Image: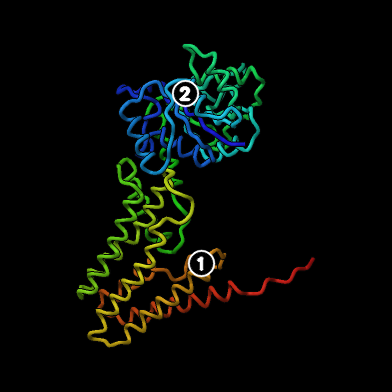
Amino acid sequence: MKLAALIAAYHEADDPGGGLRATLLIAGRTLLERQVRLAVAAGADPVVIAVERVTAPLGQAVDRLRAEGVEPILARSAAEAAAAIAPEARLLLFGDGLLASETVIARLVASDPNVLLTVPDARVDDRYERIDAHSRWAGLALIEGTLLRDTAAMLRDWDLQSTLLRRAVQAGAREISVRGESEDEVPMLAETGADLAEVEERILAGAHTPARDWVSRYLLGGIEQAATRALMPTSVTPNAVGLAATLLMAFSGLAFIQDWLLLGLLFFLLATPLEGVGDRLAALRLVGERGQSWWSAMLPVLAAGVLLALAHALSDTRGWGCFVLAGVIAAFSVALRIETEGRDVPGKIALADPKGMAWLLLPFGVAGLWIAGLVVLGAYAVGSFFWAQHHAHRPAAPSHD
């Protein structure tokens, strides 16, 4: 059965500056944008935003979503919301100001309607609507589209969110309780920006993809985290960070062609943390598809071009053998990537990759020992390939069953 989402976005925040709860900021974007992306990630289509007035921040948030390929529907009345959502759809209801984890939403979506996410009364305050003497609504519900249609037909000046909740309770909706055993399990209902501050820190701490190489884990991790924190409240997008990385790689190649060897290496090294920063920022804002980003796919190709540019610069004084070394490094790096793709190779994080090889080349470049550095990188790439090949194609241990 098709899943749709309805997000309430009309209650005023309690901040001195005013504004809507939906436009409170988290990770440099509005809470509404995060809610919409969570709904889309859960498989909801359409995503309807119930509004009473379109403020400038709310309109800008919707424009950003549409520019990034997400098409939420604005509904200025219950009737408009009901018209946008098929009666037979399963409807995921987001409370106004709700901040929930993907895990909690997935748990609810896996259930059959009608079901309410609840929290024990003793664990939360009056921001959470009371259901009975023992439980309050945690801000998420999975209901039938027909309930929205019937509610819209009789709704007058009542609050749509609260009325839907009451009617779901009256219809005997099942309750799924979250008790807060883990720190992020209970969804947050934010009324002020301060409510989101602590949650934002937790999101930032978890906004990273597993390190694919030893440099990101042991050398660049702190730099990537600090840069992500600095960029979080800005308008800088993950795509902009990825573009900066690709431009730095291009500048590196151009510098090598001009025989500015140390400058070329510097540009390459400056590009190395940006891939991780872009991936962290994308994870933080729930932007883009799961899996490899476009810049992660493009940077190894650019790295090969930079390596050939370095070989060209060195060949003027050190001969054609520089191209042989560069070719060996590039060929075995590509072969290594193929061998390890989708495979769990022991010690995979320590194997050769462009970022790690750039940092290994640094001491040789500073000392002017470029050829020695390429020889070491060649041995590193060849050794990594044969290590990966040995473990990737090793016969499985015989079963004793």
Kindly indicate the quadrant of the structure image that contains residue 20. Answer: top left
Element on which disc 2 rests: helix
Q: Which amino acid does label 2 sit on?
A: Glu
Q: Where is residue 324 in the image (x, y as percent from the top left)?
A: 36, 84
Find numbered disc 1 in the image and state the secondary structure of the residue it sits on: helix
- In which quadrant will I find the N terminus? top right
* Count of numbered circles on the image: 2
Alpha-carbon span between mark 2 and mark 1: 53 Å
The residue lying at 44 percent from left, 63 percent from top is 213
Q: Against 261, is 296 above or below?
A: above
Residue 317 falls left or right of residue 271 = left
Q: Where is residue 119 in the image (x, y as percent from the top left)?
A: 58, 26
Q: What residue is at 54 percent from the left and 32 percent from the top?
A: 186
Residue at x 61%, y 27% (from the top left corner): 144
Q: In which quarter of the image is residue 61?
A: top left
Where residue 390 appears, as percent x and y from the top left, is 57, 76
Camera-side residue: 323 or 176?
323
Q: In which quarter of the image is the C terminus?
A: bottom right
Assess disc 1: are there few (<14), some (14-19) or many (≥20) residues with their C-alpha within 10 Å of its C-alpha. some
Q: Do the residues labelled 2 and 1 touch (CB within 8 Å)?
A: no
Chain-order first, disc 2 or disc 1: 2
Q: Does 39 sit left or right of 89 as displayed?
A: left
Q: Name the residue under label 1.
A: 348
Q: How crowded is mark 2: few (under 14 residues within 10 Å), some or many (20 or more)?
A: some
User: Which residue is painted at 41% across and 38% down in the image?
Assistant: 200
| 51 vs 97, nearest the viewer | 51
Give amino acid for label 1.
Lys
Residue holding disc 2: 80
Picture layout, residue 13 above or below residue 339 = above
**55 vs 286, nearest the viewer:** 55
Vertical side of 271 occupied by 132: above or below? above
